Amino acid sequence: MRTTTPSDAVLVRRSLHHPEEFEVLFERHAATVLRYLQLRVGYSLAEELMAETFVRAFDARRRFDSRRASALPWLYGIASNLIRMHFRTEERRLRAYRAAAGLETQPGDLTAESVERLHASELAPAIAAALAALPVAQSDVLLLHTYAELTHDEIAEALGISTGSVRKRLHRARRFMAERLGLNGNEEDESVPTPTTVGAVSKQ
């Protein structure tokens, strides 16, 4: 007899009464979420944030929209929120270090983008510099689209924004990346960057 593999939605629903079912969801998606986090924050922090992503997902599983067959957009959204929280914490920490050293913090010295730049060493230099210079809201959308290969609707679900906002942020991010990478200003080029190029540089 052929056994049907349960969808993510079924696993989440079952886990409400049988928490061990959530382990199957973890095994199914942990490696994918980890690769995304490694791309964003580097290898040293990615495992910690991946674990925290699933802890938060487990605690919030009653709020999962069971109409969605895949839990990945939901998990990417939790991971993206943790990344932003990390950058804010890192910014405060660096400000404290500067103050303790008697260094005056200048406006713009420690923006979220500059903190993200500290973790971009895993990427190829040109793409890393361009991604780090993007506002975090735009880099979230760009990477969820090109690397995680989510649809506009799935990105909107993950980040809690409208589909229209996704399209606007993606358009601006592509245009910026094209200009920074010298691709003739072609902001609609799907190769700015593609899952292949981003995945390749993340392994360097």
Image (tube, rainbow, N blue to C red):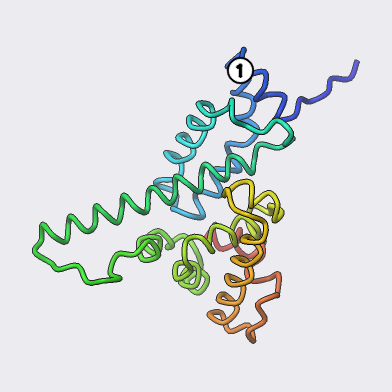
Which residue sits at x=61%, y=61%? 165
Q: Residues within 10 Å of mark 1 (few under 14, many from 20)?
A: some
**Front position in the image: 181 or 176:** 176
User: Residue at image x 48%, y 29%?
Assistant: 55
For this orientation, the residue located farthest to the left is: 102
Residue flagged by tag 1: what amino acid is it? Answer: Leu
Disc tally is 1
Q: Secondary structure at mark 1?
A: loop
* Residue 3, horizontal then vertical, whole percent: 84, 20
Is residue 124 placed above or below 91 in the rendered structure? Answer: below
Residue extending furthest bottom? 184
Q: Is residue 35 above or below residue 65?
A: below
Reading the image, the residue beneath label 1 is 16
**Residue 73 at x, y percent in the picture:** 64, 44
Task: State the image coordinates of residue 171 (x, y, percent, origin top left).
Answer: 64, 71
Task: Name, please, the residue furthest toward the top.
Answer: 17
- At 40% from the left edge and 65% from the top edge, which residue is drawn? 113
Q: Please state the horizontal and vertical placement of residue 132, each as a whole percent of the image.
A: 45, 67
Query: Residue reaching furthest right?
Result: 1
Is residue 37 shown left or right of residue 142?
Answer: left
